[in-house]
Amino acid sequence: MGHIRLGRLPATQWWEDVVGLVTEGAAAPRVAEATTHAWHLAFDKVRNDAGFREAVWLLTQLADSGKPSKASAKPTGGLDVSAAGSVIEVALALSEAMDRRLEADRKRSDFGELAQRALVASVTEHLQKEMPPLLEPSKEDVARAVRMCGKEKDFGLLSKSFFARLTNECLNYFLSKALPGLVGEKRRFTTTEQLVQFENAMRKHCEESAVIVEDFSGKWLSKNMYKSEGQISRETAEKFGWYGLEKVREELAVRARKDAAK
Amino acid sequence: MQPSNFIIPCGGLTAERTGNGDTVELPLELWAGKDSNVTLKVGDFEKGLFKTMSPQFADLMDIASYVYCADQATSRGALDVDNFGSRWRRRFTFRIPVRAPKFWMSEEVGRVLRETLEFLSDDTFDFAFVGGVSLPGMTDFFENLQEGTGQQIERVVLFSGGLDSLAGAVEETVVSKRRVLLVTHRPTSKLNNVQRNLENLLAEKAGAFRPMHSHVRAWKDSELNKNYTQRTRSFLYAAVGATMARMVGLDTLRFYENGVVSMNLPICAQVVGTRATRTTHPRALADFERLLSLVAGSPFFVKNDFIWDTKAEVINRIVKAGCEDLIKASLSCAHVYAFCNEHPHCGTCSQCIDRRVAIVAAEAEAHDPASRYDRDVFTGARPTEEDRMMIASYVERAKQLKKIRNFPELISKYPEVIRAVKYLPGTHLAVGERLLELHRKHAKEVDRAIQRVIVQRAEALHEGTLPQDCLLRLVVGSGGGVSAAKPESGPGHEAQEARWEKEREGPRIYRLTKNYKVWQLVYQGRKALLDDERAVALTEYLLKNPPDVPIHASELELRVYGGAAVDSAVGAGAAVGGVVQEASGKKLMGGLGPILTAELRELRATTTDMSIPAEERDAAEERIKVLLKAHERGGRLRGGAEQANDRVRKAISALIDTLKAAPSGKGEPHITLREFGEHLEEYLWKPSKGVKGRGALGKPGCYTYTPPPGVVWRD
């Protein structure tokens, strides 16, 4: 590793409650809910975050940016994957589009970085699943998979993955300031493997919770593409993003209460 | 509150604006003799090789010194959780006197300089360059010029004294037998003897090709030591190294760092942006090249030939070259200020962990005794949370990397990796494959190292005599040790349940609240979310402010959107400074007439001018309502009352339809939203056109809300 700077959670009541739950052996659902309660101050600070807005907007633009008609015209927001020959090139284009925008506006933030991670990771994973399993994917395979991201069903799946990842990234952003320190004998996680298992459980919990936005997302895209004649604005995309995130957070709360009631 | 904005007037210049609460002014001075608080000196360079360079190079060294010093003199956020890490990023505004102002003030140079520093550090940089007066020349940066051999230098290499740069120096001088200039930073005089010792050992190995060493002192006054993250250090190094490379007639500067550290993928989720250094990230080196080429006025290159090596492979290079006895003399620890001869390595920082794991993986322990670590990386206790976090995250990352099967999967797990692809030679696919292979090799090395030590310490593990917090025990456990976790009960659980109880809304609670971009609904105590649509805002107004007398749609819009409705009516920009004075104003404003338009515009400006007393603003607001009300009879407000009614009716009807058909997202109807939709349909009075529901009382296009008993909508 090069130099790495790690931080810790503050000793405020909310965060101590989170760590308390972990120490007491709480499962992922309850820890997730407590974390989403504790992070409210942090999230108040990232309303109007440029990176989050850009990531959600790029998600809605993906399918359109793959159309050949965009190749010669200057693409909106700098995203053009019409000539992408591989999933890697799509991922690169997305990452560069975000970097270009945020560096030009000089509005980098941690939340924006998490959103960028979620965007690149979810699109890469989604497209990779659509590639032929045994053969080297062709440019047409990539183009088709990108185009399908503009259809209700695929956009729903992609959004679900995006919101699941973003929620998980945000949870881990905070929890990783405490959980690895709870590894060791007579602590919550006796070994690093137990910590990994907990993190896997958390990721799965986020994936299952995000199912709640799949259907809504697909329908949202169809409705808003129609309303805006294919030109979804950043503002509209941002509203979708916050709605999706809140919806998953709400579901985390529902599932935590159900888990407690077992 | 901890400031994050810094104004840095340099070289005796004054700041263009003064600091206030959140902004701090920090003057820095490099050339004021004993009044200087920053020092940059290059020592032990050969007299015969020294040349006067173009003023841009001297300026570059000044700029890099000031940037590096400001980086260390200003704090980043520590426990910055509740700000979502916003304090990590600082804003710097420099004002620097330079010898070549026209060059530095060009748009391209300014942009490249900013982009280079901003990628490297995550901070924001603004520069104002001013023509300097009597600024020293290049000579003044140099001290202790040496009589030399007069031999031509073939390579200029940055040499930190760590394992990677040592391997690079060995490759160049011992293996390839090149004449090399090594440029070394001296962070503290404490390390002078250590560095001298390493240099002497290297010289012995290199024989006739013993390298030239030049030492850089980049110091500042002690009260400016506030931050040790030093993300801009490599920029200073690159500036000095490039200057010396050009001085000796070369167009390339070399860093040597293993690829895993160059990429520095996050070890856990909190490591965002430059929490992980980008010292030799492929993009950082490409940025250096761009800037240095501009400064040099010709192409200049910055290379790292170890980009595809792991650290263990780097160590193997040293061993293969017969220089293994130099390993012990190298220094990797980040905690240089805590250095002591007996334990030059702390054993807890990320650099020590990386070093020791690679040493064991390369089976080179004999050349790097564990006793030289204050804490054994594998078997030393780690009582602090931070130490356990570092080691546990490091091991976990290696385990994850080991499982990755292809490059897209690596991108999915570590999306940051994609940033390096276009800065590495080869097709994207080929580069991706190499990056995957690099990280897989690293993961296997970490595995191999841990397994070696497990075998070596098997008895101690079995007997349970190793400290319970050491790396081996964190990975392996104690073979039967149980977790301290109780079966999901305790004060934390109780506190959470108490909070849930408090948050529970009773069955007679009704709320509709605007959060950021989302509406929060509580209907009969049950929660749901609503999209941020116009119709919800209009509905919310009616629910919370049910008019005694139904109000027209245009009035409803005015009450909900207030000035925005007027702005729309009188045209964009009319609220503040907009002017439409010509006779065609009547046509543009949709028939309001120029006199009415002008009056409305003036009144609107009054309502938004906070310097005007509140009573006057309220009066202006009332006057607007009166004027618009009077005008609406003529149907000429924003296309007419009829169109306003049409808009509002459609919006609210669409909302009700959407609510009544809302799915839960789990393939079932959303009971709460549907019941809310039915409630609105039943109790929200809106104009009906022969459909079910109550019609407006009296006037067409009018709305109100008459809730059933016991229903009161709150915030």
Image (cartoon, coloured by chain):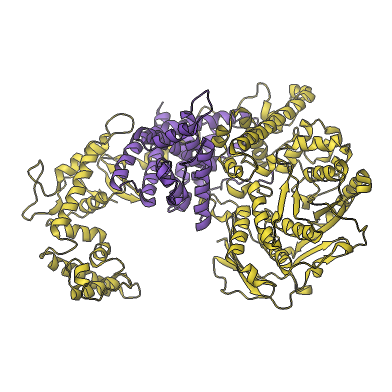
Chain colours: A purple, B yellow
Q: Please tell me in which quadrant of the rendered image residue B35 appears.
A: bottom right
Query: In the drawing, does residue B209 fall left or right of residue B470?
Result: right
Please provide percent x and percent y for residue B231.
66, 53
Q: Residue furthest front?
A: A72
Q: Is residue B368 visible?
A: no
Please provide percent x and percent y for residue B293.
68, 58
Please provide percent x and percent y for residue B372.
83, 40
Q: Residue at x 24, y 40 (%)?
A: B658
Query: In the drawing, does residue B85 fall left or right of residue B170?
Result: left
Q: Residue furthest bottom?
A: B133
Q: Residue at x 43, y 52 (%)?
A: A47
Query: In the drawing, does residue B353 fall left or right of residue A81?
Result: right
Q: Residue at x 37, y 52 (%)?
A: A235
Q: Please tell me in which quadrant of the rendered image residue A154 appears.
A: top left
Name above or below for residue A74 compared with residue B12. above
Name above or below for residue B21 compared with residue B148. below
Q: Residue furthest left?
A: B698
Name above or below for residue B215 compared with residue B388. below
Please provide percent x and percent y for residue A16.
53, 43
Quarter occupied by the N terminus of chain B: bottom right
Name above or below for residue B666 compared with residue B648. above
User: Nearest the camera: B296 or B434?
Assistant: B296
Query: In the drawing, does residue B236 fall left or right of residue B321?
Result: left
User: Nearest the camera: A189 or B699?
Assistant: B699
